Each structure stands twice: as C-alpha cells, then as structure tokens.
Amino acid sequence: MRGGDNRTGELFSYVDLEARVRHNHPLRAIRTIVNEALSALERDFAALYSPIGRPSIPPEKLLRAMLLQAFYSIRSERLLMERLEYDLLFRWFVGIGVDDAAWDHSVFSKNRDRLLEGDIATKFLTAVLAQPNVKRLLSSDHFSVDGTLIEAWASMKSVKPKDGSGEPPAPGGGRNAEADFHGQKRSNDTHASTTDPDARLYRKGKGKKTKLCFIGHGLMENRHGLLVDACLTQADGHAERVAALHMIEPRADRPTAITLGADKAYDAEDFVNELRSMNVTPHVAQNTSGRRSAIDGRTTRHGGYAVSQCIRKRIEEAFGWIKTVAGQEKTRFRGRDRVGWAFTFAATAYNLVRLPKLIAETG
C-alpha cells in the first residue's frame, strides 16, 4: 500500500535531540573531548566577560559552532547560521534546543576580538592535548616541524608604494579597475598592501608566483602525527626557522635529548647549532645543492634519522586538511593576529577529527 504524500508538519515533537543522533556518530566522541576542554577554560572565559549587563551568546557555543564550520567546510558564518537553523545534528553538537533560534552571524565578528584577546585558540589546543586519554597518545621525545603558506585576503592590486607615489586609480574604473604591473619592481621594503598591511609579498621558490601571504607553522609529535603547537608569522625567509625554535624550546627543557625532524629549508648552520645548544638532535634533511650541509655523519649515521625523515612528511597531511577542509588556504581575515587565531583553531579541529579513532585503537 502506497503511503500518502502528506506535507503538513507536526505541531509538536516528542523526540529528544539526543535520540536523533546515532550512538556511533563520530561527533559524539568529538563532543565529549570538546566539552571537557571547554570546561577547563571556564575561568578564562569568565575573565573575558563583564559580570553585569545583557548576557551574551556563550563562548562555548560559539566555539562548538566554529568547529562545525571547520569540519564541514562551511565558507562563512552566515551560511553556518543558516545550517544551524534547520540541521538537528548541528543543534545537538552546539547545544541549543529545537525551538531555540539561531543567533545572527554578526555575533562571531563581535566576539572574535574578545576570544582573540584571551588567546583562546592556543588555550583550547592546550586543553585538548592535556586530557589524560589524549596525553598518553603524544610523544615527548620526537617531533617534526614545517611551515605552509596562507594566502592573504588581499589582492595584488592593493600593493602600493609606501611613500604614496603610486598612480591614482583611473576614473570610472570601479572598485576593481584594470592595472598593469609589468615593468614595476615591487618589494616588501618599498611596497605594502593597503587592504592588509601585515601580509607580505612572498614566493615558494624560483619561477613560482609571488603572492601576498603569511606562513603558518606546525609542530607535530611523531607517534601519531598530532599537532602539539601552531602559530603564524609574516612571510620571510627566516620565519620558519625562528618559529621552529620558538615552538620546540619549551619541550627541550628536560635531561635527555629530543629530536626534531624538518625538511631542507631548515638546513642552516645557525639553526642546527641552536638546536644542539638546547639539547635537541636536528633530524633535518640535508641540502647539498651547491652547498655544504650543516648536518653531518654525527646525525645521519643513526637509524633514528631515517625514521624521522620518513615520519616528518606526515605534517603535510595536517596542513592539507587545514587548508582544504578547514578553508585556511586563503584566509577570510585580515591582520596577522586574526589569521593566526584562525590557523591555530583549525589545527585544533584537525586533532579533534583524528582523536576518536586514535583513542579507540589504543584504548
């Protein structure tokens, strides 16, 4: 017997949101980890808000919603709120009821500065990694580091001379007027973007296209390939090595030596010597292209060196997820602080995607 095509919705629902989500849904395990981490940040959240006045949207719900945006590759907060309006799975994960209205997308803009001021992205990453069932997964001896370009939210047309000597835009050209840069020599010393002054002109190598970008840096532990630290800097030739020293230094404060794997870009004598002075064994790939490598037989003769060179490449998996799934390949924000906050938060989201399976396998 064929059922009728009835299109009138029920006035009342007696099914709880908890029952709408299957018991083995991946978001269940992720939500448990997230809620524990957010509970650990209770005091940090309290310090960011005034004890009086109109209650705001809870920061815990904002962060859960932003995680969903990263997990499901939602390109804007406006579309995220539209999805939250009708998606019961999203409502369950964020923590709002069936009858509760989704908040306006502008709430994210108003609260982002507050979360940025409290460095919540870094603290959230730390809180996730500090949980006992997560901490036991992490290696404290072997790490890998790398950097990746994050394209700025600025056009090359916004790059103008710092002294104001550039030609004025042609009349009637509109907001995206034609521009001819052929024959012009532009550098970070003489030019800057009027859209995002923190962005820098940079290219990955000879023959590559120059872009306005930042460099995102990640520190990965080698046991399961989880990111234990992340930061973002302006783009220049020394940024990767400086960021690597900054991230590995707190973990080198121990009696026994640790190892740090890296690619050829980190094969510089000053960097290698600095690592050794911190009791860090530099498992850096040798760069012998027309030069002498700073890595010699003292390091390469050990079997652990070859293992580190193999494992260090897994950090590219994290960068690939952050840039494609989490949408950080071309940032939607302006300013180093905002872009860095989003990059670190995306690194936490990457860990959360992988943690349920890792915990189940090792539990």
Image (cartoon, helix red, strand yellow):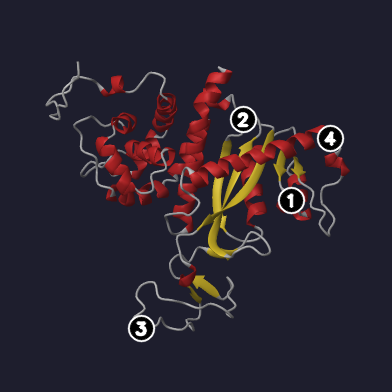
Above or below: residue 93 compared with residue 236: above
| Label 2: element kind | loop
Q: Which amino acid does the dot numbered 1 rest on? A: Lys
> Residue 102 location, x and y as percent?
24, 40
**How many numbered dots are placed on residues in this image?**
4
Q: Is tag 4's residue or tag 2's residue first in the polypeptide sequence?
A: 2
Q: Determine crowd level at label 1: few under 14, some 14-19, many 20+ residues with C-alpha closer than 10 A.
A: few
Q: Which residue is mark 1?
A: 264
Residue that appears at 50% across and 63% down? 198
Q: Which residue is mark 4?
A: 302
Q: Determine crowd level at label 2: few under 14, some 14-19, many 20+ residues with C-alpha closer than 10 A.
A: some
Q: Which residue is mark 3?
A: 171
Dividing the image into 4 quarters, which one contains the N terminus? Answer: top left
Q: Which amino acid does the dot numbered 4 rest on? A: His
Q: Is tag 1's residue or tag 2's residue first in the polypeptide sequence?
A: 2
**In the image, is 242 to the left or to the right of 214?**
right
Dividing the image into 4 quarters, which one contains the C terminus? Answer: top right
| Label 3: element kind | loop
Q: CA distance from mark 4 to mark 2?
A: 22 Å
